[in-house]
């Protein structure tokens, strides 16, 4: 059974989640679970080997690699959106360009902050032995990620609104053409 849409009631407010938001939420929850499992695996390894530095450095290398892959995937998606806007017959709206620019800045900030903290933790582990800075940066990174999802939702809803309005405009034009043809046929038959 696949979940196509869901409604949640929380404090009397009903929240409707579209299928894309459900899939994004599931992906986010899966990544959080993997993050926790990976971290706990490294902690268990450090207890077993009693070599905390090696496990922390391995985890940091994984986090640095993750931030670089995240940057590549996100930027690839934005390049796709730009090409999608350039390919369409109608040029990209100024609002859409602003949203894509905002998203690029958000993604760059998200990845640069995480990358910087991980590199700092890798070079100077004594600076933050309890990983408090990394935890704080992860919270800030999640805020940037939710901001990215909000902008993505705006982009996709504007795209759907535009395609619907273009379809309505085309339908109205077709209706006016057929109405004018009908009027000309009625007018020509009345003269006969």
Image (tube, rainbow, N blue to C red):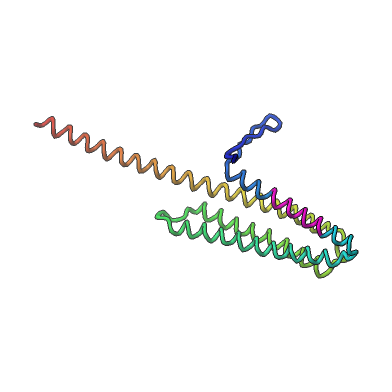
Relative to 48, 35 lies left or right: left
**Which quadrant is home to the C terminus?**
top left
Camera-side residue: 17 or 133? 17
**Which quadrant is home to the N terminus?**
top right
Identify the image quadrant of residue 72: bottom right
Camera-side residue: 67 or 127? 67
Relative to 92, 182 lies left or right: left
Please state the horizontal and vertical placement of residue 45, each as a whole percent of the image: 85, 61
Relative to 6, 166 lies left or right: left
Relative to 158, 112 lies left or right: right
Q: Is residue 186 magenta?
A: no
Camera-side residue: 122 or 183? 122
Please state the horizontal and vertical placement of residue 56, each as a whole percent of the image: 82, 64
- Give me the residue at 71% from left, 31% from top: 11
Relative to 170, say whether 122 is above or below.
below
Give the extent of the magenta segment.
29-41
């Amino acid at each position: 059974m696949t979940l196509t849409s869901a409604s949640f009631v929380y404090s009397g407010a009903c929240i409707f989640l579209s299928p894309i938001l459900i899939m994004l939420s599931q992906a986010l929850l899966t990544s959080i679970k993997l993050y926790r499992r990976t971290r706990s695996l490294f902690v268990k390894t450090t207890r077993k080997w009693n070599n905390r530095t090696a496990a922390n450095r391995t985890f940091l290398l994984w986090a640095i690699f993750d931030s670089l892959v995240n940057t590549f995937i996100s930027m690839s998606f934005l390049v796709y959106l730009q090409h999608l806007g350039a390919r369409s017959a109608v040029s990209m709206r100024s609002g859409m360009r602003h949203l894509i620019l905002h998203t690029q800045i958000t993604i760059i900030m998200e990845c640069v902050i995480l990358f910087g903290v991980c590199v700092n933790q890798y070079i100077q582990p004594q600076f933050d032995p309890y990983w408090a800075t990394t935890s704080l940066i992860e919270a800030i990174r999640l805020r940037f990620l939710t901001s990215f999802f909000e902008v993505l939702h705006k982009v996709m809803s504007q795209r759907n609104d535009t395609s619907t309005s273009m379809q309505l405009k085309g339908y109205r034009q077709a209706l006016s053409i057929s109405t004018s043809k009908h009027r000309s046929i009625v007018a020509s038959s009345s003269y006969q």
